[in-house]
Each structure stands twice: as structure tokens, then as C-alpha cells.
């Protein structure tokens, strides 16, 4: 089968198209013929060995796939952990879910990782209360575009989106944000307050780190919560306990890997997301489907914010 494999860590050039044997599923696993493989910003961290969890080389990256389960012929979406950038992938049966009728592969892929992340940002991490203001950074991205749409349904009173370009801010407004502002770090604290009618904000969903993290933390009201779920800038932050106490603010971390092994955290939320799509309440912003051989270019475009919505690889292209 054709697959993208890394034999060393480094730049996009380490993603090489190779021929590998079709993987054999182990105990409790299933084999999936991949129609689409999902790309995530975390893939760029894994490529440079800067991810929260360490990998062993050689590695076929890709943590989620949509395709056909080979033992049953059922259309499924699966959290495979790794191995997704390929024509076939294995995944734990417990993390393989039927795709409902009428839902395409790209939508299912977006919901199984980005959608679940957005859902848990609201429910598990920030525990948003009715009427609270919520800031969604990178609002045109995979998680952000879904988090914007979930805002009012999850109780947010005012959804403030940030994005890097006018087109992306326009998309955030189309998806339901009350206001959209430039997400650049300089002046961000003041822009967020202005967007919230002059008041500090209650909740921020943050995935960049660095100066954007600091500016977002400074924008919080007393008892506000900043939920960090990524470090796109690769700049870690230091939080001082005295500063948190002085302002009665909270910083909460979220890593989706901790949902694995807790079936209720996935099954209930995913069923809810699929139902929202069925009712027409949730729209997945579908990004570009790159040919498998263009995985390096896809990761580069993703890292440089040239993409919108859910980005995928097409093994058949």
C-alpha cells in the first residue's frame, strides 16, 4: 500500500511517500480502507518531535481516518493514534464509530477530533455558564469554526471570534460569532475588551501560546477561565500563582488524548455532534483534500495558516 512515512524528525521533507505492507490488525483492532485521513496541527509537532507524547521511528503519521471497515463493510470514522496517512490503517475497535447516513467523510473526521475538542472545551474544561462571553481564537480553523457554532447552544451569551484575515473573520461571523477581531498578539487584550462592550471576558479558548496566551489571560474577568489546547507558536508560557489568585482567574489545559480510555467522554459527545449535524445546527467547514503524496505541502499550508476548516489527505489521489 502507499503511505507517508517518517524515518527522521525534521521539516516537511521528512514526509516520504513509500510502499508498505498492509497492516494486520491486532487483538481488539480493525482494519480500515482509508478514504480520507485527517490532518491536525499536532501532526506538525510530531514531525519535529515536539509533541506532548513521543513517537518511535519510523512512523506513519495521522491520528484519525474515515473509510470502510474491512471486516464488516461499514463506513466508519476511527481514532487510530498513528498510521492514518496511508491507504489502509488499523484502529482500536472501541475507537471506531459508524458514520451516520448523510454524513460525508470530511464531516465525520472533523467531528471525531476537532468537534469533540470543541465540545469538551465548553462542557468539560470551561464549564460555560449561561450568558458568559466566550472568545474563540483561530475561529476559521478546524476546532475554532465548530466552537463558534456551538457557542450559543452551549450557553454563551456573546461569542467573540478572532482570526488572522478579513476573509476568515467574515467566515466566523457567518458561522454565528457576534463579533470578529484581528487575532494578532499586539493590542489583543484591548481588542477583546472592546469586542465585549468594554468589559473583560469570561472564557477564552486558546491554542497558540506565547504572546497570544499572555494577552488572552490579561483579558479575563474575575473568575474567568482560559482553556489552552495547543501551542501553535511553540512558545511555552509561565503562569504565576500569585497573578492567578490576585485576579481570581483560572488556566485549564486540555489534551484530547486523556479522553481515550474514557468511552463516555467520546460516545456521548460524538452522538450529540452527529445529531446537531443531522438537524442542520452544525456545519463543518471543509478544507482542501490534498493528494496523499502532497502531505508535506498540506502540513506546510496548515502550519502557515493558509488553510480553512478541516484539512484531509486523499489516499486515492
Image (cartoon, rainbow, N blue to C red):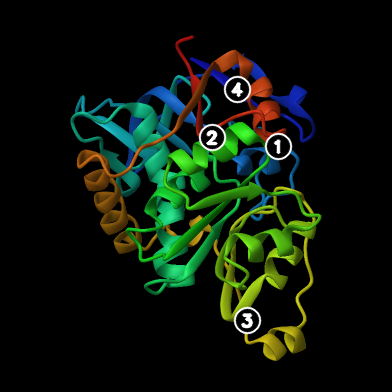
State which quadrant residue 57 falls in. top right
Seen in the picture, residue 89 relative to 150 is either above or below; the reply is above
Tell whether 286 sits left or right of 244: left
Looking at the rendered image, the disc whose residue lies closer to the viewer, 3 or 4, is 3
Q: Mark 2 or mark 3: which comes first in sequence?
A: 2
171 vs 314, nearest the viewer: 171
Comes first in the chain, label 3 or label 4: 4
Callout 1: 10 Å neighbours few (<14), some, many (20+)? many
Residue shown at 42% from the left, 32% from the top: 65
The image position of residue 41, as x and y in percent, is 62, 41
Q: Which mark is residue 47?
A: 1
Label 4: element kind: strand
Q: Is residue 30 above or below residue 241?
A: above
Q: What residue is at 51 percent from the left and 33 percent from the top? A: 83
Q: CA distance from mark 2 to mark 3?
A: 35 Å
Q: Residues within 10 Å of mark 3 (few under 14, many from 20)?
A: many
CA separation in Å, label 1 and label 2: 11 Å
Task: Compute the Cα span from label 1 to label 3.
Answer: 34 Å
Q: Which mark is residue 62?
A: 2
Name the element at disc 2.
loop
Left or right: where 310 falls relative to 236:
left
Q: Residue at x 35, y 62 (%)?
A: 154
In the rendered image, which quarter is residue 291 located in? Answer: top right
Residue 249: give its label. 3
Disc number for residue 32: none
* Contact, mark 3 vs mark 4 (Cβ under 8 Å): no
Nearer the observer, 162 or 225: 162
Counting labels gives 4
Amino acid at each position: 500500500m502507499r503511505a507517508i512515512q517518517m524515518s527522521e524528525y525534521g521539516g516537511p521533507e521528512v514526509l516520504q511517500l513509500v510502499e508498505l505492507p498492509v497492516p494486520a490488525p491486532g487483538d481488539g483492532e480493525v482494519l480500515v480502507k482509508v478514504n480520507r485521513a485527517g490532518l491536525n496541527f499536532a501532526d506538525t509537532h510530531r514531525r519535529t518531535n515536539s509533541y506532548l507524547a513521543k513517537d518511535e521511528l519510523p512512523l506513519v503519521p495521522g491520528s484519525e481516518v474515515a473509510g470502510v471497515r474491512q471486516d464488516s463493510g461499514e463506513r466508519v470514522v476511527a481514532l487510530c493514534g498513528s498510521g492514518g496517512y496511508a491507504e489502509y490503517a488499523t484502529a482500536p475497535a472501541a475507537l471506531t464509530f459508524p458514520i451516520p447516513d448523510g454524513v460525508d467523510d470530511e464531516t465525520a473526521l472533523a467531528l471525531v477530533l476537532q468537534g469533540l475538542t470543541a465540545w469538551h472545551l465548553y462542557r468539560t474544561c470551561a464549564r460555560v455558564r449561561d450568558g458568559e462571553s466566550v472568545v474563540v481564537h483561530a475561529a476559521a480553523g478546524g476546532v475554532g469554526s465548530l466552537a463558534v457554532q456551538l457557542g450559543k447552544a452551549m450557553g454563551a451569551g456573546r461569542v467573540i471570534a478572532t482570526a488572522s484575515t478579513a476573509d476568515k473573520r467574515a467566515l466566523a461571523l457567518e458561522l454565528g460569532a457576534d463579533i470578529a477581531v484581528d487575532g494578532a498578539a499586539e493590542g489583543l487584550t484591548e481588542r477583546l475588551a472592546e469586542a465585549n462592550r468594554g468589559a473583560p471576558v469570561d472564557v477564552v479558548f486558546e491554542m497558540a501560546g506565547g504572546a497570544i496566551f499572555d494577552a488572552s489571560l490579561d483579558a479575563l474577568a474575575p473568575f474567568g477561565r482560559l482553556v489552552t489546547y495547543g501551542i501553535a507558536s511553540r512558545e511555552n508560557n509561565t503562569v504565576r500563582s500569585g497573578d492567578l489568585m490576585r485576579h481570581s482567574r483560572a488556566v485549564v489545559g486540555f489534551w484530547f488524548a486523556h479522553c481515550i480510555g474514557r468511552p463516555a467522554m467520546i460516545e456521548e459527545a460524538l452522538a450529540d455532534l452527529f445529531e446537531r449535524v443531522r438537524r442542520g445546527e452544525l456545519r463543518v467547514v471543509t478544507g482542501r483534500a490534498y493528494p496523499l503524496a502532497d502531505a508535506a505541502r498540506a502540513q506546510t499550508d496548515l502550519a502557515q495558516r493558509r488553510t480553512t476548516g478541516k484539512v484531509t489527505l486523499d489516499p486515492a489521489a
